[in-house]
Image (cartoon, rainbow, N blue to C red):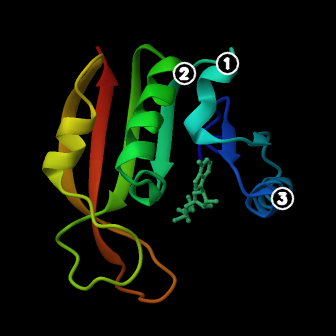
């Protein structure tokens, strides 16, 4: 999506299969984007910095400990004034199947030092098992 908008785009996932599929899709669409197998919990090990990070469905996979590691990793990789856009499963989604539900308060308490929360809005996340999708939070969070 970012590459289609003409932006310099890099995608990461720690699943080599996910990266292969993304590379294949970009090639089929004639788009120029880089993809790497990488651990989002260890982004500080790279000197690369980004002005914008898009997260669809990653934040909600982490337990409390890894959530804190992820925010630290993100803090090291997002440039000053950069922004993090995050779509995650919400606690407003009924049931206990699928990913961990995240509350608005948990998002707020995760991004305190060095971050400013610009908005957290109700949204929907596409899922494979229900065409209606699932309740999600769309958060816009900036480095401060
Ligand atoms: C729920 S899926 C979302 C996939 C895709 N973004 C989407 O919207 O369909 C979560 C993805 O996060 C990846 N993932 C989980 N932990 C990760 C980590 N520590 N570093 C990088 N990727 C990770 C998984 O391999 C998986 O592809």
**Towards the viewer: 71 or 35:** 71
Q: Is residue 19 left or right of residue 78?
A: right
- Separation of disc 2 and disc 3 at Cα? 24 Å
Q: Residues within 10 Å of mark 3 (few under 14, many from 20)?
A: some
**Towards the viewer: 20 or 64:** 64
Locate residue 72, reporting x and y percent: 44, 27
Locate residue 13, reporting x and y percent: 67, 50
Q: Is mark 3 within 8 Å of ligand 1?
A: no
Residue at horizontal 40 percent and vertical 44 percent from the top? 65
Closest to the camera, between mark 2 and mark 3, is 2
Which of the marked residues, 1 or 2, is nearer the chain's N terminus?
1
The residue sitting at the left extreme is 105
Q: Residues within 10 Å of mark 1 (few under 14, many from 20)?
A: few
Q: Is mark 2 within 8 Å of ligand 1?
A: no
Q: Are marks 2 and 3 in contact (CB under 8 Å)?
A: no
Give the number of callouts: 3
Residue at horizontal 20 percent and vertical 47 percent from the top? 106
**Image quadrant where one finds the C terminus:** top left
Residue at horizontal 70 percent and vertical 51 percent from the top? 14
Which of the marked residues, 2 or 3, is nearer the chain's N terminus?
3
Q: Are marks 1 and 2 in contact (CB under 8 Å)?
A: yes
**Towards the viewer: 122 or 66:** 66
In this figure, which residue is indicated by the disc labeled 3? 20
Q: Secondary structure at mark 2?
A: helix
Q: Which mark is residue 48?
A: 1
In this figure, which residue is indicated by the disc labeled 2? 77
């Amino acid at each position: 999506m970012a590459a289609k908008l003409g932006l310099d785009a890099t995608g990461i996932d720690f699943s080599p299969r996910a990266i292969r599929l993304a590379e294949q899709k970009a090639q089929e669409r004639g788009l120029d984007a880089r993809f790497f197998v990488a651990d989002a919990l260890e982004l500080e090990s790279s000197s690369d910095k980004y002005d914008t990070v898009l997260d669809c469905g990653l934040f909600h996979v982490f337990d409390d400990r890894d959530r804190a590691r992820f925010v630290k990793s993100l803090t090291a990789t997002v440039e000053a004034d950069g922004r993090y856009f995050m779509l995650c499963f919400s606690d407003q989604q009924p049931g206990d199947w699928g990913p961990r539900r995240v509350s608005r308060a948990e998002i707020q308490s995760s991004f305190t030092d060095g971050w400013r929360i610009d908005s957290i809005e109700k949204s929907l996340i596409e899922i494979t098992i229900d065409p209606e999708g699932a309740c999600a939070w769309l958060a816009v969070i900036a480095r401060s």
